[in-house]
Image (cartoon, rainbow, N blue to C red):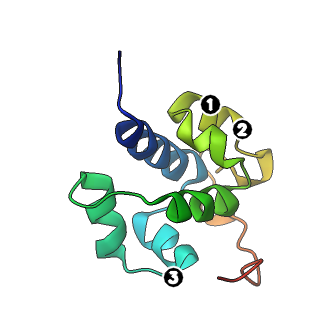
Amino acid sequence: MGMSLEERVRSAVAALLHAAGESQTDLAAALGVSQAQVSRRQSGTAAWSLTDCEAVAAHYGIDVLELLAGPTRATEALPAARRRVPGRQAAIQRPAAVEGGV
């Protein structure tokens, strides 16, 4: 049957981090959790909750269903403005304020 839903989410998060040129620390800050919490979720020690998934999707500007669909759909949905430009690591756009809050 392929990947489990949890594996799909972990793969999608890893793919989005890579595509956006972000670290687990960047994502953790956006979600208001510690880098260790993101690391545990990504290693499978802890699970990404549905609430987490909604927050991750909002952070990357994609629909939560695209995140749940796995890495291919998630990265295809990533807005161009959120993608890192190869060779221009310093040019990552940082929003001045986190939208929505918790």
Question: Please, is residue 10 above or below residue 51 in the view?
Answer: above
Q: Give the amino acid type for the residue marked by disc 2 in the picture.
A: Ala
The answer to whether mark 1 and mark 2 are in CB contact below 8 A is: yes
Within-10-Å neighbours for mark 1: few <14, some 14–19, many 20+: some
Picture coordinates of residue 97 (x, y %)? Answer: 75, 84
Q: Earlier in the sequence, mark 3 or mark 2?
A: 3
For the N terminus, give its image quadrant. top left
Give how far apart the Cα atoms at labels 1 and 2 are.
6 Å
Q: Give the amino acid type for the residue marked by disc 3 in the picture.
A: Gly
Mark 3 lies on residue: 32
User: Residue at coordinates 77% horizontally, 77% vertically from top-left?
Assistant: 99
Q: Earlier in the sequence, mark 1 or mark 3?
A: 3
Q: What is the secondary structure assignment of the residue under circle 3?
A: loop
Residue 77, label in figure: 2
Q: What is the secondary structure assignment of the residue under circle 2?
A: helix
User: Residue at coordinates 51% horizontally, 64% vertically from top-left?
Assistant: 52
Question: Please, is residue 69 above or below residue 41 in the view?
Answer: above
Q: What is the secondary structure assignment of the residue under circle 1?
A: helix
Q: Give the amino acid type for the residue marked by disc 1 in the picture.
A: Arg
Mark 1 lies on residue: 73
Picture coordinates of residue 26 (x, y %)? Answer: 50, 71
User: Residue at coordinates 51% horizontally, 34% vertically from top-left?
Assistant: 71
6 or 80: nearer the eye? 6
Residue 2, label in figure: none
Picture coordinates of residue 88 (x, y %)? Answer: 63, 54
Picture coordinates of residue 21 (x, y %)? Answer: 54, 55
